[in-house]
């Protein structure tokens, strides 16, 4: 193997200029469902959060909160304590965001 390249456990080469194929990404998500679900929910929730419509913003907070819960579970299972702390605190912030939107009138 050429110097500066590493073989991953999935067989893709890190640093390959062609990148990772869609098939490799799908295979990775099949094996790491928790991580991929958490990523998807967090990204979709993040897109909804800055919207002006209060209902869509609430949906964004709820999706992002669900993603936070999955990230907390993922990081706990893998012993990623920095990530665990960060996602736990983001979850608390999102919980307060949801409560604020549900129980206050603007």
Image (cartoon, grey):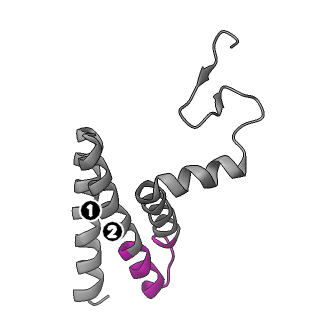
Residue 104 visible in rendering: no
Most extreme residue toward the bottom is 105
- Principal secondary structure, stretch drawn in magenta: helix
The residue under the point 41% across, 73% down is 63
Mark 2 secondary-structure assignment: helix
Per the image, label 1 sits on a secondary structure element best described as: helix
Stretch in magenta: 48-62
In the image, what residue occupies the spot 68% across and 14% down?
Answer: 1
Marks 1 and 2 close (CB-CB < 8 Å): yes
Q: Based on the displayed image, in which of its 4 quarters is residue 81 positioned?
A: top left
Residue 31 image point, x, y percent: 49, 52
The quadrant in which residue 10 appears is top right
Quarter of the rendering occupied by the C terminus: bottom left
Q: Which residue is mark 2?
A: 65
| Residue beneath the point at 27% across and 90% down | 105
Residue 36 location (% of width, % of height): 48, 57
Whether residue 27 is in magenta: the answer is no
* Mark count: 2
Residue wearing tag 1: 91
Q: Position of residue 89 (x, y in %)?
A: 23, 55
Q: Which residue sits furthest right?
A: 18
Residue 55 lies within the magenta run:
yes
In screen coordinates, is 14 left or right of 63? Answer: right
> In this rendering, would 47 be left or right of 59?
right
Quick check: 39 above or below 98? above
Mark 1 or mark 2, earlier in chain: 2
Residue furthest top as drawn: 3
Q: What is the spatial separation of the Cα atoms under label 1 and label 2, in whole angstroms? A: 6 Å
Question: Does residue 52 show up?
Answer: yes
């Amino acid at each position: 193997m050429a110097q500066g390249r590493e073989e991953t456990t999935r067989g893709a080469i890190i640093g390959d200029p062609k990148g990772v194929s869609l098939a490799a990404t799908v295979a990775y998500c099949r094996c790491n469902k928790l991580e991929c679900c958490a990523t998807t929910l967090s990204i979709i929730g993040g897109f909804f959060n800055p919207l002006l419509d209060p209902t869509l913003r609430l949906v964004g907070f709820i999706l992002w909160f669900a993603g936070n819960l999955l990230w907390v579970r993922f990081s706990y299972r893998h012993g990623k304590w920095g990530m665990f702390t960060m996602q736990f605190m983001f979850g608390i912030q999102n919980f307060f965001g949801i409560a604020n939107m549900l129980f206050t009138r603007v």
